[in-house]
Every structure is written in structure tokens, then in C-alpha cells.
Image (cartoon, rainbow, N blue to C red):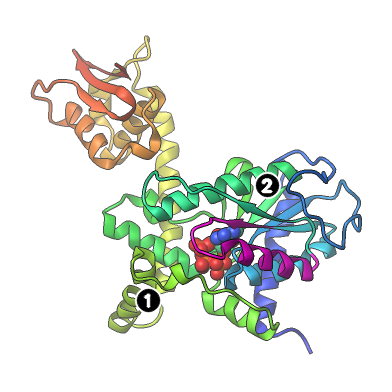
């Protein structure tokens, strides 16, 4: 008898991604032999694979999604000659979080992963609490991947997470880049992979259940103080009640369509950014005016970032103001942007530079 359908589904999802990783031309990071220093905490399979075989890490919180992911990685990786390891990040935000991280390490080792590491991080205060924890987590995962020379890091985001991301973007009035949610491949050199982006959360949970994998339910996920938690427990169920089942799937489809559109517009904007410059490299207002607004806004945004405006602080309202120098010109003064960048119209040219 074959595995339970939920287990078969998670394994297939991981197998596909591992196959992609193996057939990628460029490795995300060089492949040194595994080191046994510092935070490295090797398990019982040490030395099982030749040191030069590629290593793939799973980022595991101990929750159902990433535990299911870890189990599928442990099952599929050896068949492809890949070493499978794991990292759990201790955000230090709850009492006893270090003990929980220790437990996750044990569970990952029991699955046969090696190396397995727990990394404690200090969560900063920039942005909201969720954003600060995320920044600290990704920095720690990047460092762990560099330390171990890992080819890729697998994340357990599901189709439900994707639907939530799209809804959050819609509610903020974001553009299609934001509505395109999370990419299946992201990060420097494409090191982050999300094999479960097309699977629902229930499948991951079921796979853990039938494999008797203990999972940890993060109390933050049920805490109504967090926007995402309210969306998960109140917003999406209400939408499904009003619009019928299939909302999550439809939102995930919106994400994919938006991603394709956003990619096409970005590519158009890259070409346009060259075409609208004069011989000295300044932006020509008449040529900018002739561009479709979606392309023009992208050109202006890239020009502001090139001039030194931090991408994370550059919002739609900033770009709209700069855009009005082109489409609603009535002699306005200079526009101040984040990062001390100034946008100013000088004759028929738009000058964006650090002031
Ligand atoms: N503390 C952590 N340590 C390592 N990886 C993490 C941690 N928290 C989240 N991740 C990674 O990010 C993914 C998304 O996490 P998030 O908390 O947003 O979603 P989730 O649906 O609650 O996932 P999970 O059920 O795995 O906790 C996880 O599946 C995991 O791969």
C-alpha cells in the first residue's frame, strides 16, 4: 500500500523542488565541505553522504507546515544524493522559546536530518513586531545557509499563507507586485524555495498526523492582536461563508496572475528607463509623459532607488507625488523622498538625486 495521499502530496512537492535545485545552472552558494565549528550541531548521519553532495536545509518552526516539509525532505533528499539539514530560529519572544527550539532540533534529528542547528536571534524594533521577527529570521537563515554552504533553504508557506498575503495587499491598496504574494523561488541566487505554495494547510497538517509527527502550534498564530491571525481565523472563514469555498484557491491564482503581469511590466520598465534618458542620462519629461502610467511609475521608482532612496521606505504616495511633476506640472517645488533623495523638474528634464 502506498503512503497516505497527504504524505504522497507533500513528498511529490518536495521531490519537484529538489529536482529543480539539482538542475539549476548556478548554485546559490558555493559547496564547501560541511564545517563542524561554532553553532554546528551534527546528528547521527554525519559522514553518510560524500561531503561534496549538495545540502538543502529546511527552515522549521516546529509548526505543522514546516514539520511536514522536514519529513518530506528527509524522505526525498537521500534518494537524489542530496544531504538534508534543518535550522530552527529562536526569536526569544516567549518564555521557554529556547527549550522549544531545542525540542525542534531533536525532532529534526529524529527524522535523520544533519546538520541541524538552532539559532537564537535578537528581534529589532524596526517596523511592526511581525516584520522585525521576519527580518531577524531571514538574516539568521541566510547566515546558517552560508555557514553550511547550503544550496537552498526550504520554507513551509502554503496556499493559505499565499491567500492571506494577497488579501493583506488588497486591503492596503497595493499594486500588483504586492498582490503577487510570495514567490516559489526568492532570495539571493534563488536560495529560498517554497515547495508547498500550491498545497493547502490541511494537507500539511494531515501529513503530520498520519506520520505521528508532533507539531507545535505557535500561540502567535491564534493571537487576535496580530493582523494575520485575525485574517486567518475570522477574515478568510467569513469570506468563504459569503463567497463559497474556493476563495483561498482563487486568491492563490490571483497571486500567480499578478506575478506574471508584474514581471512583464518590470521588464518593460527596464527597457523604458533607458529609452527616456537624454545623452547625459537625465530623464526627459516628454518621453516619461508618453509612457503608460504603470510603466512610468516603475521607471520613477527605480530612478529614486538608484539615487539612494531605500526601497522599503519608498511608498506609492511618494511615487505619485513625483509622477505629478510629469503629469500634473504646475511649477511645483522639489519633492523630498526617503534617504534624502530629491526629485525636481528642471526645464524638460526630471532630476532625481541625493540632496
Ligand atoms: N522560528 C522559525 N524557525 C525556522 N523557520 C521558521 C520559523 N518560523 C517560520 N519559519 C519558516 O517560515 C515558514 C512560514 O512561517 P509562518 O510562521 O509564517 O507560517 P506557518 O504557516 O505558521 O508555518 P509553520 O506551520 O511551519 O510554523 C515556516 O513554514 C518555516 O519554513
Residue 307 seen in this snapshot = yes
Quick one: 37 or 204, which is closer to the camera?
Answer: 37
Can you identify the residue that label 1 sits on? 233
Q: Position of residue 240 (x, y in %)?
A: 34, 80
**Extreme top residue here?**
280
Residue depicted at 38% across the width and 39% down the height: 312
**Above/below status of 302 relative to 286:** below
Tell me which corner region of the image, top left, top right, bottom left or bottom right, holds residue 205: bottom right
State the extent of the magenta-drawn residues as a range. 87-112
**Which element is circle 2 on?**
helix
Can you identify the residue that label 2 sits on? 144
Quick one: 113 or 272, which is closer to the camera?
Answer: 113
Q: Is residue 204 left or right of residue 308?
A: right
Q: Position of residue 43 (x, y in %)?
A: 83, 60
* 157 drawn magenta: no
**Above/below status of 131 relative to 2:** above
Local crowd at mark 1 within 10 Å, few (<14), some, or many (≥20)? some
Residue depicted at 27% across the width and 28% down the height: 337
Residue depicted at 41% across the width and 47% down the height: 262
Q: Is residue 196 left or right of residue 116?
A: left
Residue depicted at 20% across the width and 18% down the height: 345
Q: Is residue 15 left or right of residue 197?
A: right
Residue 27 seen in this snapshot = no
Q: Position of residue 192 (x, y in %)?
A: 61, 51
Tell me which corner region of the image, top left, top right, bottom left or bottom right, holds residue 257: bottom left
**Extreme bottom residue here?**
1
Which quadrant of the figure contains the C terminus? Answer: top left
Amino acid at each position: 500500500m502506498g503512503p497516505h495521499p497527504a504524505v504522497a502530496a507533500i513528498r511529490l512537492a518536495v521531490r519537484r523542488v529538489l529536482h529543480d535545485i539539482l538542475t539549476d545552472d548556478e548554485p546559490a552558494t558555493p559547496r564547501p565541505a560541511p564545517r563542524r565549528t561554532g553553532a554546528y550541531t551534527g546528528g547521527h548521519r554525519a559522514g553518510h553522504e560524500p561531503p561534496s553532495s549538495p545540502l538543502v536545509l529546511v527552515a522549521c518552526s516546529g509548526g505543522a507546515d514546516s514539520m511536514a516539509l522536514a519529513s518530506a525532505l528527509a524522505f526525498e533528499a537521500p534518494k537524489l544524493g542530496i544531504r538534508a539539514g534543518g535550522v530552527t530560529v529562536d526569536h526569544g519572544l516567549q518564555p521557554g522559546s529556547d527549550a522549544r527550539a531545542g525540542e525542534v532540533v531533536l525532532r529534526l534529528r529524529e527524522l535523520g536530518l544533519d546538520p541541524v542547528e538552532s539559532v537564537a536571534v535578537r528581534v529589532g524594533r524596526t517596523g511592526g513586531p511581525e516584520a522585525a521577527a521576519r527580518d531577524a529570521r531571514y538574516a539568521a537563515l541566510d547566515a546558517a545557509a552560508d555557514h553550511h554552504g547550503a544550496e537552498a533553504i526550504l520554507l513551509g508557506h502554503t496556499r493559505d499563507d499565499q491567500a492571506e498575503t494577497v488579501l493583506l495587499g488588497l486591503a492596503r491598496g497595493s499594486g500588483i507586485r504586492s498582490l503577487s504574494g510570495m514567490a516559489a523561488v526568492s532570495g539571493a541566487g534563488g536560495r529560498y524555495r517554497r515547495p508547498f505554495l500550491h498545497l493547502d494547510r490541511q494537507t500539511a497538517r494531515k501529513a503530520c498526523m498520519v506520520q505521528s509527527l508532533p507539531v507545535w502550534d505557535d500561540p502567535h498564530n491564534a493571537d487576535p492582536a496580530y493582523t494575520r491571525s485575525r485574517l486567518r481565523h475570522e477574515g478568510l472563514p467569513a469570506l468563504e461563508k459569503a463567497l463559497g469555498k474556493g476563495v483561498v484557491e482563487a486568491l492563490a491564482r490571483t497571486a500567480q496572475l499578478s506575478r506574471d503581469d508584474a514581471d512583464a511590466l518590470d521588464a518593460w520598465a527596464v527597457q523604458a528607463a533607458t529609452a527616456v534618458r537624454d545623452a547625459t542620462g537625465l530623464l526627459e519629461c516628454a518621453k516619461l509623459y508618453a509612457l503608460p502610467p504603470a510603466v512610468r511609475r516603475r521607471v520613477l521608482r527605480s530612478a529614486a532607488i538608484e539615487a539612494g532612496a531605500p526601497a522599503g521606505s519608498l511608498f506609492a504616495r511618494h511615487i505619485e507625488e513625483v509622477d505629478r511633476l510629469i503629469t500634473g506640472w504646475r511649477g511645483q517645488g522639489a519633492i523630498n523622498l526617503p534617504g534624502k533623495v530629491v526629485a525636481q523638474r528642471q526645464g524638460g528634464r526630471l532630476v532625481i538625486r541625493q540632496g
